[in-house]
Amino acid sequence: MIDSGSTAWMLTSSALVLLMVPGLALFYGGMVRKKNVLTTMMMSFVAMAVIGVQWVLVGYALAFGKSALGGFIGWDWQMFALQGIEPTTLYADKAIPELVFVMFQGKFAIITPALISGAVAERMKFRTYLVFTLIWVTFVYCPLAHWVWASDGWLFERGVLDFAGGTVVHIAAGVSALVLALMMGPRRDFARGAAILPNNLVLTLTGAGLLWFGWFGFNAGSSVAVESPVAGAIAGLAFTTTQSAAASAGLAWMAVERWHHGKVTSLGLASGIVAGLVAVTPAAGHIKPWAALLLGAMASVVCYAAVQLKNRLGYDDSLDAFGVHGVGGILGALMTGLFCFTPVKGLFSGGDVSQFGKQALGVGVAIAFAGGGTFVIASLLKPLMGLRTTDQEERDGLDIHVHGERGYHFDQT
Amino acid sequence: MKMIIAIVRPERLEAVEDALSEVLDEGDNYRITIDMVEGLGRQEGEVEIFRGQKVKLRNVQKTRITLCVNDAYVEKTIGAISKGARSEPGGAVGDGKIFVLPLEEVVRIRTGERGGSAI
């Protein structure tokens, strides 16, 4: 029996998560130079097209089909192209149509590779990026999602908690971003030590706002996984922890910045908000609001340190996809094991450290699998297609060379 | 006839315009062209902060104004620009420069008029 309230909330959540993709495009697009604004925004937008098709054809079957190949991945011919799913088919023991669940999960598969694009901005070949995202979602994201979220996934069976995608989405994307950034090398101007400044932080702030808004669907919508047959109580908890973590993380980033160089920047507030949202993602429906406040603040301190460490180490993760999503995701997934109180009690809720151990397993697996998988895919694509644009294209800007357009013509009538 | 090109601080443009209208306005407007430019002189570039990292800009943002005047107005114009463009009483590094160039010819497009009266 379909529950209209749950179904309405999941439809809303699905649309909210999709809104995060243009949000991410704006967030990233504002941070690059004028000559690369379109290609950077395209890298997020195009995931809606590429993965939007992949998910309907095979992605959902691979992630949420019955375990195949010894549990490595899922598969179900009924789910191929969604042909066996009727509008009236309900998802598992939930009171929502399975098609709604398919769409909700599909938005996660769309935004995850888009997160990676921040690390390779301003230098990756667009063509190679398209092929990379398709292969990456198929062979890295779908297996991971299956292990962690499918009811017969091996990490799920071991009790690893990942409420809305700390490991599957943020660690996977963040670590993959780091591997790609290291394999591709720094931008030519980064290597020369030239000033690389954002073209429009107004876009970045707008994007951060849309991300925050959409994240309510991302996290509070994910209550569908733990509440049955209808969503409600845990959705409310996840909504509250999401808001709490984002707010305290924004404050904490401002405080750290003020202490470090005496100024509170707009990019800093935006970055802090995103770091807090990332960290609370795996924890949202498992921790109390006070814990979310703490977790958000911790996320900003740790992610800020990670970004400064990057500057010291000298690798070029252009827009800090690893520093924010990778590091924030790892922190959030681990802290979930300490702060959780439902459905299991963590160390700080009268439980023991066993959940922390399970979380560490999930984190380790996600780092190793996403990092290794990305290394293999990029190593194959490098000789076949090349990862980087030519030096001249990079110098002139990718927009005009790759897309034949420029983002701004403000000087023309 | 002279062409006067001045590079001034963007935030002083209004004061320069006020000073120009005081000395040149005889029931008429001063004629000016304004561009936003960037460049480097003795003033250092600004420092911006990008995620905790200080980035020094190579160039400074300036406003370039161009006026063409008859010889009688050259010194008055120079005086007005200098007065308006100084950011503090004694002037400061970064207040800008004034260049005076000989001007060969002026043509008013509407009438085809030439020389001093077309200015």
Image (cartoon, coloured by chain):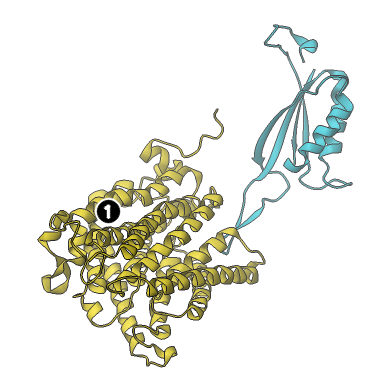
Chain colours: A yellow, B cyan
The quadrant the C terminus of chain A occupies is top right
According to the image, label 1 marks what residue?
A51
| Left or right for A206, reference B60 | left
- Note whether residue B96 is visible: yes
**Nearest the camera: B56 or A72?**
A72
Secondary structure at numbered mark 1: helix
- Tell me the chain of label 1: A
Q: Residues within 10 Å of mark 1 (few under 14, many from 20)?
A: many
| Left or right for A177, reference A385 | right
- Note whether residue A313 is visible: no
The quadrant the N terminus of chain A occupies is bottom left
Question: Residue drawn at (86%, 19%), measured in percent from left and top?
Answer: B27
Q: Is residue A352 above or below residue A118?
A: below
Q: Is residue B35 above or below residue A146?
A: above
Q: Quadrant of residue A149?
A: bottom left
**Amino acid on which the number 1 mark rests in the picture:** Ile
| Left or right for A175, reference A147 | right
Where is residue B85 drawn, in percent x and y?
81, 39
**Nearest the camera: A349 or A380?**
A349
Question: Residue drawn at (24%, 53%), measured in percent from left and top?
Answer: A383
**Nearest the camera: A129 or A179?**
A129
Question: Residue drawn at (50%, 47%), measured in percent from left and top?
Answer: A33
Where is residue B50 drawn, in percent x and y?
56, 59
Where is residue A223 drawn, in percent x and y?
34, 71
